[in-house]
Image (cartoon, rainbow, N blue to C red):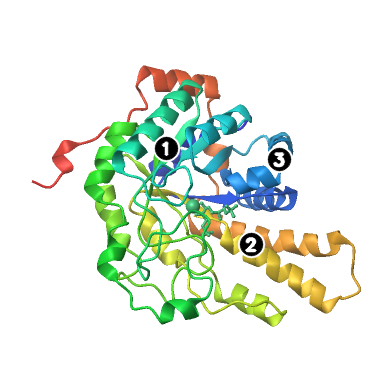
């Protein structure tokens, strides 16, 4: 089957109460790792590429690698998604390159650093929704800014908020300032009504990269209750958790054991993601865990076999280490066994469904507090 629209996959996930991991890719081995895990577990796949990934892989390589995956595994629904599009222009070029889903991240301005206001976010997101839906492409929007509740400022996209936790430890946390970048459930409700996005990324204190939390997160620094409130108000909207790597201790240890430098850190526990899935989370973004798994495996070969210079000798174990993580996440999020049950529609048919209004998200005003 050709690449499919995200909405179709997430509607199925919602009907059957599971979540779908969205893995970032930059190269062939990462795509292979995801596909091997998907075959093993019969799971639907969301492959996503950041702007950095698209420029690294020059779009054309990425496009043809994805077409190879489709050709090899025609029975697996695969979504090709633009991660953190910073402008309508980026989303348009993704669509022109065959992406079947785009994220317009209007929570930040085009520089992907400066927090944007509500009106700007609605304006750019609406623009992308109109263009994308006309082509049968789905849109993820974001309201609120990612970033740790242990820090004062929201994080810029791609920033590494606490590259060394040491520096943060000297700084007193400022919970009130920090809370202000979390998603406001009332605003989330307005945003979905105003933009008609297919999926909504929410800010609950997670951030990108390995350095998310300086301790095992609890409700103080990982605001799962915000997801619960948003889901109560928007039960028909698919929620997205960004920055959802769990940063497993064993991967940290493996990297250190083979000469890597990594300060102790904590990620998002899988149980918290599973709690999110019970409350409307359908897409879970993971990049760092896979990066760490590959790096640990490569370091191990480099350290144990210093005479090795065939790249396949370290890329193969790196791919296998990533496959393991992907497989675990498919299983943990309940996606296993569903790929064959999804009946995807062509983007042309999806465009007709958008046009007819049958995919419009129903907002139930009675769910708002008095
Ligand atoms: O959104 C964050 C992903 O980990 C992608 O990161 O911009 O370094 O490719 P990147
Ligand atoms: P991690 O850095 O936690 O893997 O998050 C990735 C992500 O959110 C990509 O959009
Ligand atoms: Zn993200």
- Say which label, 3 or 2, has the lower sequence index: 3
On the image, the x and y values in percent for residue 263 come to 56, 79
Residue to which mark 1 is pinned: 11
- Local packing at callout 3 (Cα closer than 10 Å; few below 14, some 14-19, many 20+) is few
- Say which label, 3 or 1, has the lower sequence index: 1
Callout 3 touching callout 2 (CB < 8 Å): no
On the image, the x and y values in percent for residue 106 come to 41, 42
Q: Is residue 339 above or below residue 276?
A: above
Residue to which mark 3 is pinned: 58
Residue to which mark 2 is pinned: 291
Residue sitting at the far left: 370
Q: Is residue 364 left or right of residue 126?
A: left
Q: Is label 2 in a helix, a strand or a loop?
A: helix
Q: Nearer the viewer, residue 254 or 327?
A: 254
Of the residues tagged 3 and 1, which is closer to the observer? 3
Mark 2: C-beta under 8 Å from nearest atom of ligand 2? yes
- Residue at 57% x, 38% y: name it: 79
- Say which label, 1 or 2, has the lower sequence index: 1
Q: Is label 3 in a helix, a strand or a loop?
A: loop
Callout 3 touching callout 1 (CB < 8 Å): no
On the image, the x and y values in percent for residue 315 come to 79, 60
On the image, the x and y values in percent for residue 322 come to 66, 60
Q: Is residue 284 left or right of residue 204?
A: right
Mark 3: C-beta under 8 Å from nearest atom of ligand 1? no
Q: Is residue 277 left or right of residue 42?
A: left
Q: CA distance from mark 1 to mark 2?
A: 29 Å
Q: Is residue 166 left or right of residue 189?
A: right
Q: Is residue 235 visible?
A: no
Of the residues tagged 1 and 2, which is closer to the observer? 2
Q: Is label 1 in a helix, a strand or a loop?
A: helix
Q: CA distance from mark 3 to mark 2?
A: 20 Å
- Residue at 39% x, 59% y: name it: 154
């Amino acid at each position: 089957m050709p690449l499919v629209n995200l909405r179709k996959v997430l509607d199925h996930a919602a009907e059957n109460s599971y979540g779908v991991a969205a893995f970032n890719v930059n190269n062939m081995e990462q795509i292979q790792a995801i596909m091997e895990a998907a075959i093993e577990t019969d799971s639907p796949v969301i492959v996503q590429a950041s702007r950095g990934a698209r420029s690294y892989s020059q779009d054309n390589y990425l496009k043809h690698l994805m077409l190879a995956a489709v050709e090899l595994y025609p029975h697996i629904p695969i979504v090709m998604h633009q991660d953190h599009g910073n402008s309508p222009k980026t989303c348009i070029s993704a669509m022109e390159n065959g992406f079947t889903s785009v994220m317009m991240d209007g929570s930040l301005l085009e520089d992907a650093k400066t927090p944007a206001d509500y009106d700007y976010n609605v304006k750019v997101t609406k623009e992308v929704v109109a263009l994308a839906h006309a082509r049968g492409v789905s849109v993820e929007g974001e309201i609120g800014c990612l970033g740790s509740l242990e820090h004062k400022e929201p994080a810029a996209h791609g920033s590494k908020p606490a590259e060394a936790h040491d520096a943060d430890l000297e700084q007193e946390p400022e919970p009130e300032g920090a809370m202000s970048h979390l998603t406001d459930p009332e605003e989330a409700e307005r945003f979905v009504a105003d933009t008609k996005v297919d999926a909504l990324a929410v800010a609950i204190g997670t951030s990108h990269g390995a350095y998310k939390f300086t301790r095992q997160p609890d409700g103080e620094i990982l605001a799962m209750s915000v997801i619960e409130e948003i889901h109560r108000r928007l039960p028909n909207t698919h929620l997205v958790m960004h920055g959802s790597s769990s940063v497993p201790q064993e991967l940290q240890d493996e990297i250190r054991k083979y000469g890597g430098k990594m300060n102790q850190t904590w990620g998002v526990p899988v149980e918290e993601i599973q709690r999110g899935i019970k409350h409307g989370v359908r897409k879970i973004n993971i990049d760092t865990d896979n990066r760490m798994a590959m790096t640990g495996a490569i370091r191990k070969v480099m350290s144990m076999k210093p005479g090795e210079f065939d790249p396949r000798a370290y890329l193969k174990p790196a791919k296998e280490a990533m496959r393991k993580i992907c497989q675990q996440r498919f299983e943990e999020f309940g996606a296993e066994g569903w790929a064959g049950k999804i009946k995807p529609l062509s983007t042309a048919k999806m465009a007709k469904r958008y046009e007819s209004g049958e995919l419009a998200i129903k907002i139930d005003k009675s769910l708002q507090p008095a």
